[in-house]
Amino acid sequence: MTNIQEDTEPTVGALAGETDGASTHSIATARSARRTGGLRRFLPTMTPWLVTGIVLILGVTAFGLLGPFLVGDPNAIRDSGMQAPSGENLLGTTQTGQDVLAQLAFATRGSLQIGLIVGVLATVLSAFFGILGAYLGGVMDEAFSLFSNVFLVIPGLPLVIVISGLVPQEARGLWTIAIVLAITSWAGSARVLRAQTMSIRNRDYVSAARVAGERPWRVIAVEILPNLLPVLASQFVFAVIAAILGEAGLSFLGLGASNSSTLGTMLFYAQNGFALAQGAWWWFVPPGLLIALLGMGLSLVNFSIDEVINPRLANVRAQRRRERQARRTARRSSGPGGAAHSTQTATDRKGVTR
């Protein structure tokens, strides 16, 4: 008689398959947890200062991106010059009757563009001369290090003033000012990246990748660069701050971009229009306030990133994380059913001990 009853007991192969599946799942889960924990190590702690910095940056950025679409022509000249803020002109008018709010919106966009361009260029230059030279070593490292030291000892602001002064005014555009600021602000960051890369390249996993025959660019991109992301982020933020302040200083001296509007050019025209002497605070206070708010927001974010880089601050960060975990545990224990759960846990522990 044919046995049509299906096997209800698992076979040895099935048990082995289930065991292998569970083992594979557990290994994948462990790797995912390690990866998540590793990524979390590079993220700054969400503190009130960090939240404040992010809110300030997003607010100024939103005003610079969306503001030009909501205001009129910033160059339109009217008969109502030096008018105080009113319902028609929320931030008043300039000496020639131009709307200050419209100028502020376009100037904020220009300053953000310069800050972003300089931040990207300075970070790329510092990463190229700092990371690549330190990894390759030898003559390449010596040459890159000498080149960085030359730019490091040159005074930045005088060099920027000289280069901007030599460039003709009609050719002094936004990209020209951004390139001038970028080539004078990357050397210090390159020295930091060089020191960090020399520390990382001697670690076991980098040596293992070399022995395995990995190409240099892959070792740098996969093994070294992820460990330098907090340093690169901090240097990018610092470069943006320096670029916005440097451009404002150049524009205030009359050496800024001639074919674009920035917060620095607003201060320059306010000075030439004797806004301070005439008491026209609405002309120079808003651009100065936006520069201060944006710089403060970027500085707060940079301080939070520094907690990940600085070992001493990292220890403080770990202590704060343990304190938060302890507070969460205390709240769970004091909540509904927490006492009964604690009593049951204590009873189970006593039973196990006996």
Image: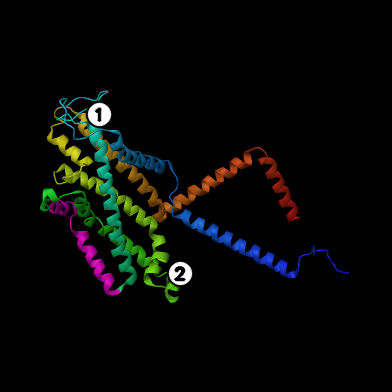
Query: Badge 1, how many Cα within 10 Å: few under 14, some, many 20+?
Result: many
* Mark 2 or 1, nearer chain start: 1
Rendered residue at 14%/51% (across/down): 171
Rendered residue at 25%/24% (across/down): 88
Circle on res. 296 = none
Residue 231, quarter of picture: bottom left
Query: Badge 2, how many Cα within 10 Å: few under 14, some, many 20+?
Result: some
Q: Position of residue 125 (x, y in %)?
A: 28, 60
Residue 226 is one of the magenta-drawn residues: no
Q: Position of residue 12 (x, y in %)?
A: 74, 70
Viewer-nearest of discs 2 and 1: 1
Q: Which residue is mark 2?
A: 205
Residue placed furthest toward the right: 1
Q: Main secondary structure of the magenta part?
A: helix
Query: Whole-Å distance between the Cαs marked 2 and 1?
Result: 59 Å
Q: Position of residue 323 (x, y in %)?
A: 52, 46
Check the image and report above or below for 12 versus 351.
Answer: below
What range is drawn magenta here?
138-164
Q: Position of residue 173 (x, y in %)?
A: 18, 49
**340 relative position to 169: left or right:** right
Residue 145 is one of the magenta-drawn residues: yes
Of 129 and 340, nearer the camera is 129
State the SS at label 2. Answer: helix
> Looking at the picture, which amino acid does disc 1 mark?
Leu
Q: Which residue is mark 1?
A: 91
